[in-house]
Image (cartoon, rainbow, N blue to C red):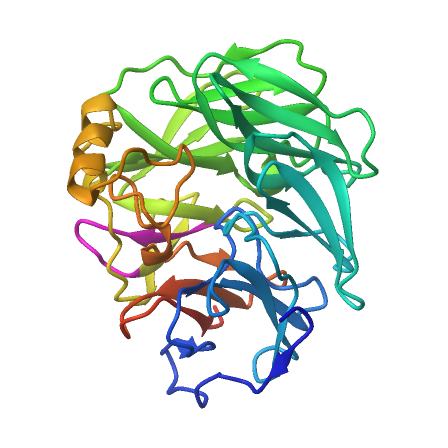
Amino acid sequence: MKGDVTPSEAAPPPASGQPRPLTAAPAVNHSTYFLQSPLSPDEHTLLFISNRSGAAQLYSIDGFPDGPIRQWTGGPPIHPFSPAFDPGGDVVYFVRGGEVWAIDRDTLAERRIAAFPGAQLGEVSLSADARFLTAAIKSGGTSGIAVGGVDGAGWHVIEFPRTVIHPQFHPLDPEWIEFSGDPAPRMHRVRRDGRDLECLYHHGNDEFVVHETFLGQTGDLVYTVWPHSLWRMDWRTRERTRICEFNAWHITPNRAGTQVLCDTNHPDRGLHLIDVASGTPRFLCHSHASSGGSQWRTSRYALAEDFARARSEAGQTALSWMETATDTVYGPQSSHPHPAFSPSERWVFFTSDCSGHPQVYAFSLPHG
């Protein structure tokens, strides 16, 4: 139940160069999404999501890495990849159904920020000035971006004619949001008030642009053309530069924008750090995650027939627009590593189901 505290599940410290399991319950346990660090700014509290109580709820390891486990939420399930810390680490924002919530780290008191009855919301992104939140939204036949204040003021929807995923505030300018349209063309941007909506790169379904994010504090974008290469895009000019030929998958840059952390798939070469200047990848460790999803065996976006086939194979009438545990086209997402840095960039966190259930792992980055 909410507020329950249970003993640590962390394995003993491993040999040098090996990852350490931090959870062990026979359930789905996974880290936050690769666009967010799961560790609080003071590096004391590690967030993870688990269905060990029967539904996806938010948990923490208090006193990372060896502290006890505390359950933060209860009741209706949360969006399993939505939680994100505020800059001070005292509040975590998350999505539950069609609602955006905030929860206090110390008291676990919850506050509903915004509600869109009957809608589905995706993971949240916080603006650089910590005043605004955004999340993808789907309500009936309408898709777009929900955006508004952390105080609950001014929430509105910026509509878009296709499915929207992964909206992210610009790290230097809280007026700009980058988001993904699905399927192609992928990369778009819009001002927070809905003005100046534009496509950043026109490409077809056969150029599988995925997992774009901001290249740290450079303000530029970095993205993968799956499964071939890693690219950089100038935010102002839209000039594209290839960083390297490598099957980088989920990508997370450091704050300086000098390195990109990634997992790999088809083939799984493990987790790597890519030097942006030289394009040289450096091996970190293996995740041995199963990395499910039929579309990752191809080099194009999923189309209607791909989802129809997945529904038929799963015996379902529908698959969620969001990436969920039932999605066999792009998931299940809990089978993907989704690596992310700690705030100090001394640790990497990822998920692996190599033990039979998805668990959260930590890897201490080597110096140099």
Rendered location of residue 332, percent (x, y) = 32, 50
Number of marks present in the image shown: 0
The reply to whether residue 261 is in sight is yes
Question: Would you say 70 lies left or right of 274 here?
Answer: right
**Where on the picture, by quarter, is residue 214?**
top right
Question: Residue drawn at (28%, 34%), measured in percent from left and top?
Answer: 317
The reply to whether residue 191 is in sight is no
Q: Which residues are magenta?
A: 258-270
Q: Taking 289 as reference, is 142 above or below it?
A: above
71 and 20: which one is in front? Answer: 71
Question: Residue drawn at (55%, 68%), measured in percent from left and top?
Answer: 346
Specify whether residue 261 is painted magenta.
yes
Q: Taking 344 as reference, is 187 above or below it?
A: above
Quarter of the figure with the N terminus = bottom right
Question: Residue drawn at (45%, 90%), measured in percent from left and top?
Answer: 12
39 and 145: which one is in front? Answer: 145
Rendered location of residue 41, percent (x, y) = 70, 62
Q: Taking 210 as reference, is 73 above or below it?
A: below
Rendered location of residue 139, percent (x, y) = 53, 24
